[in-house]
Image: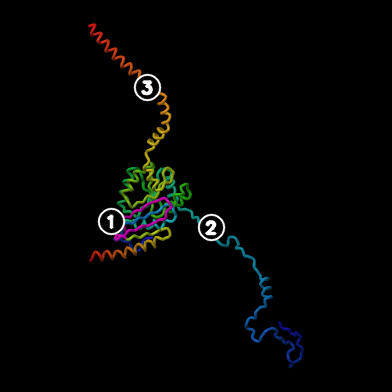
Amino acid sequence: MSATLCVKLQRNQGWLPLIQSVRHGSKAVTRHKKPVHILKQKLIAVTQYIPPARTVPPGAYPSEEKHVQEDNEFVLLLKKNLEEVFEECKMIAVVQTNACSVDDMLMLRHRLCKHGIKIRFFPNQVMRSFLSNSVYSNMAPLFIGPTVLFVSKEPKVKEMMSALRFSPQMTLLGACIDNTLLSAQGVVSYAKLPSLTVVQGELVSGLTMLTSRTAFMLQHHPAHLSALLQQYIKQQSPDDGAEETPKAEEAS
Amino acid sequence: MAAISTVVLKAVKKITIQFCPFESNVRSTREFLALVGSEKVRSTNTNCEVISVVKHDKSEPVIDVTYVDGERLVMKGEWLTCREMLSAFQSRCKDKDPQIKAGAKK
């Protein structure tokens, strides 16, 4: 920028200094930044230093992936209870209770105990974590808000529905009967089904209807013939008896 | 999330809440039902019926409130929070309540 005259200072005292820097290419006031030429700008942009990405040494920060918390013992106990409930009981109904009073709850418990239906309560979180790991994961969306389980070993749906009719604030949401998930309407139609023996009898009668009809048709003619013959014999025998008795009377 | 002031159902004739529990958008509706169906709230007006209808047809959850003077408030709870529904309901109940009281006094 400046052409400096670098000449060694000779030992001339009183003379003007021989090294004089001449300002070249700049104005008097040099506080403002001089605009950089476009070519120089481009060059600087292209040759800019990009430092290598500094990797964090392993073990520097704690890993953030540990969201899975181990269950505490109480939760494990509850899950064990839940497993037993699901294994033993054929009918598990989910009912939403809207803060019913203690008296109503007691009455309901009493009515259901008569038919062997128990009321059980589990926290929703425990319930949902248990269901997500088990086969019954489709029941999980039912467990929101205040819910209670009605469990029983035998599927006594009619008695449960009649007991629920007395307490209108309990809403039946769904049920798992014989490992089958049913909605509220499904439970109602299940209650209207006839018992198993009746259904089996109907099925058997429907299947054997055709064969019994064939057998009847085959036996129809001989049966009719034998009936006619019997009738003829009966008619003959009173005639013989009537002839014999007048002959006996005549004889006597 | 409990309401700050309990709901008074004096001006309400009937509340019908219908939802499909297997859908994922029913949380707020169920919470509203839990709040409105509780003993405390229902005891403010024993003539008011709270009917819950459980369906299974992927329909959206609807809360239908019929007031004593015949007005109806229909809230579709799919995208509303429980608080919003409750505040709308409570404000209308409060508006109707003093009207009824003033009418009774006259």
CB of mark 2 within 8 Å of CB of mark 3?
A: no
Residue B47 is labelled as: 1
The subunit carrying tag 2 is: A
Color scheme of the displayed model:
rainbow
Q: What secondary structure is found at the residue carrying circle 3?
A: helix
Task: Inspect the magenta stretch and tell me whether residue B59 lies in it.
Answer: yes
Bounds of the magenta span? Answer: B41-70
Q: In the rendered image of this protein, does residue A49 appear above or below residue A185?
A: below
Q: Is residue A206 left or right of residue B98?
A: right
Identify the residue at horizontal 32%, vertical 48% (top origin): A165
Amino acid beneath label 1: Asn
Query: Dividing the picture into quarters, in which one does residue A223 lie?
Result: top left
For label 1, the SS is: loop
> What quarter of the picture does the N terminus of chain A occupy?
bottom right
Q: Residue tagged by mark 3? A: A224
Q: Determine the CA span between mark 2 and mark 3.
A: 88 Å
